[in-house]
Amino acid sequence: MDIKLQTKGSTLIASLSGELDHHSAKAVKDMIETAIVNKSAQNMVFDLTNLTFMDSSGIGLMIGRYKLITSIGGKVCIVSKSKTLNRLISMSGLTKLMDIYQTTDDAVKSMGGM
Amino acid sequence: MHNTNDNEMTLIFKSKSANEGFARATVAAFASQLDPTLDELADIKTAVSEAVTNAIIHGYSNTVGDVHIHCAIKGRTIYIEISDKGHGIKNLAQAMEPLYSGCPEMERSGMGFTVMETFMDSLDVTSVLGEGTTVKMSKTLRS
């Protein structure tokens, strides 16, 4: 599991690669939380383009960050082209809370102000 | 009549989270003899990951015990049984409700059983308080 964090304006982009499960979720959560605070991020993009596996631990991780970001008035969205991941995401009801985009550029643009 | 394709395997490992990836990859490797589609393989891996994570988090919580996986192939169907000898589930009906989480503080989504139910053809869970939990799942793969 690898995570790359970058910011565009006030949006934090977390690009995840490898396998996201309960074992890896805690470290990913800690890194994202630290980055949100250090970079004063208001919005967040989960880039799952290079994720090869995710179970419901990933859903829990995204819901947790959604609660944090929306509590400061921001938005969260997802970048994913994987049919398998998108099926899990929509089954969990997460698509009611955040939109899914094909590219990080589209996702960042959707935050507005870019 | 015995089918020449029938096969079985058993895997026993410690309830450490580092073994989650090992467990789902091993079951996927065993299932691959049925020549599954990528989607079918992803379904099996995800369902196994959910059951193994439950055994580690809820079954044994802060202790370490053995997680048993038994897989059988009969024709085009794979049967997967995942069991622990941990705490057991007090209220199974409640635990199986979508979005119910036994560990809200751990940021679990409460979707584990729903994922297993959706991605596999059958799901059967039995649990005895103080004795452990057994999850039985099956999936028939397209030929």
Image (cartoon, coloured by chain):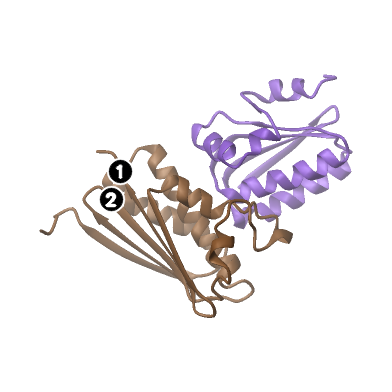
Chain colours: A purple, B brown
User: How many callouts does the rendering have?
Assistant: 2
For image coordinates 85% across by 19% down, the residue present is A113
User: Would you identify the image quadrant in which residue A96 lies?
Assistant: top right
Residue position marked by numbered label 1 in the rendering:
B141
Amino acid identity at mark 1 = Leu
Left or right of B23 on screen, residue A32: right
Secondary structure, mark 1, is loop
Please determine whether, in this image, residue B132 is positioned above or below residue A87.
Answer: below
- On the image, the x and y values in percent for residue B27 come to 38, 55
Q: Are marks 2 and 1 in contact (CB under 8 Å)?
A: yes
For image coordinates 32% across by 57% down, the residue present is B79
Disc 2 is attached to a residue of which chain?
B
Please determine whether, in this image, residue B61 is positioned above or below residue B131.
Answer: above
Amino acid identity at mark 2 = Thr
Quarter containing the C terminus of chain A: top right
For image coordinates 49% across by 36% down, the residue present is A84
Please determine whether, in this image, residue A100 is positioned above or below residue A2.
Answer: above
Closer to us: B13 or B53: B53
Left or right of B28 on screen, residue A92: right
Q: Residues within 10 Å of mark 2 (few under 14, many from 20)?
A: some
Q: Do labels 2 and 1 share a chain?
A: yes
- On the image, the x and y values in percent for residue B63 come to 60, 76
- On the image, the x and y values in percent for residue A87 come to 52, 36
Secondary structure, mark 2, is strand
- On the image, the x and y values in percent for residue A71 come to 86, 42
Earlier in the chain: of badge 2 and badge 1, it is 2
Closer to us: A31 or B109: B109
Left or right of B27 on screen, residue B58: right
Residue position marked by numbered label 2 in the rendering:
B77
